[in-house]
Image (cartoon, grey):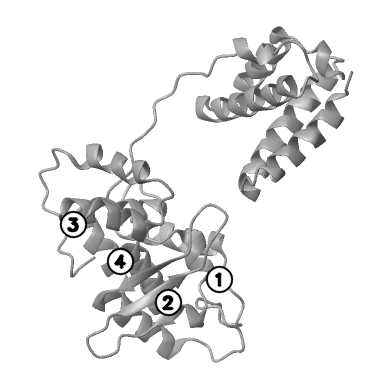
Amino acid sequence: MIPIHEAHSKFINHLKKQGRSSATVLAYGKDIEQLKDFLKEVDKTQVHDISSKDLQAFMAKLSKEGYTPKSISRKTNSTKTFFRFLKVNDYITDDPATLIEHPKFEMKPPRILTKMEYRALRDAARADIRMSAIIELLLQTGIRIGELAKLTLSDIKSSQGNKSGELSIPPGESYPERVVPLNKAAESSLKHYLDIRPNVKSDHLFITKTGRPLLVRNIRTAIDRYFKLAGIKDAKVNDLRHTFVAHHLMAGTSLVLVSKLAGHKRLATTEKYLNLIQGRLEEPIKLEEL
């Protein structure tokens, strides 16, 4: 017999040994912590005492508390993974999570900015040199917002002669190291920003007026504000990345090359965009604009 709090700790250690990203470990950990708190309320402290009815009651409680089907589905996945771990390691003889079903919900397809929206966003931010450079980089390179926030001055290589500028993206927990070319629009916008960037010791590319690194949440908030100013509805920061991938594929850029530039771990991730762009009547944005 093993108490659930001990099983929880063993599960987290197992995920870490598997090399799961810190974000994944944290998400699973919080989901099982929530389940553990619920089971404590119904006086279930040993893993072998937990039944399918207990897990169904937990999911029903989440629904009553206003969790979306998508959130409940994620917690269902965490629960199933947790109990599968317990079963494989012989901490339990029967897996009560096998009968738990995922709630149905509709996955919204990635949002792709139209040519008009694309230009409107750039125009809206043009007077804000720092944010203009940030938006330009996201649109022109397709990098993730987390990657952008970590960029340092040494990650940028300016163009020389016939050789275009480059952006070095260090490896992350869920993406490989890669080099992304900088087109004229991105490099020009970066140059304007560097001309007014505070002269401080920080090596971070994007910083505040006091020299502190600009945080992801601050970048996200600022871009959301420019979405609003540009009259772009239902768009998120990650949609700039979707726009980069989709318009490159529409323009005929190699699937393998787009996958490499975007830092996708699997080609299948990039292939999903092919169905999304099929039948779009709009012409892709010219590559010199991307």
The answer to whether 288 is drawn above or below residue 88 in the figure is: below
Amino acid carrying label 1: it is Leu
Instruction: Classify residue 31 as left or right of residue 91.
Output: left
Q: Point out the frontmost of discs 4 and 3.
A: 4
Name the residue: 51% across, 29% down. 70
Q: Disc number at residue 214?
A: 1
Name the residue: 52% across, 77% down. 152
Label 3: which secondary element: helix
Instruction: Classify residue 287 as left or right of residue 72.
Output: left
Residue 129 rendering spot, x and y as whole percentages: 38, 79
Q: Disc number at residue 130?
A: 2
Q: Residues within 10 Å of mark 4 (few under 14, many from 20)?
A: many
Mark 3 sits on what residue?
115
Give the distance between the C-alpha atoms of the residues marked 2 and 3, in whole angstroms: 22 Å
Give the distance between the C-alpha atoms of the residues marked 2 and 1, in whole angstroms: 11 Å
Label 1: which secondary element: loop
The answer to whether 254 is drawn above or below residue 18 in the figure is: below
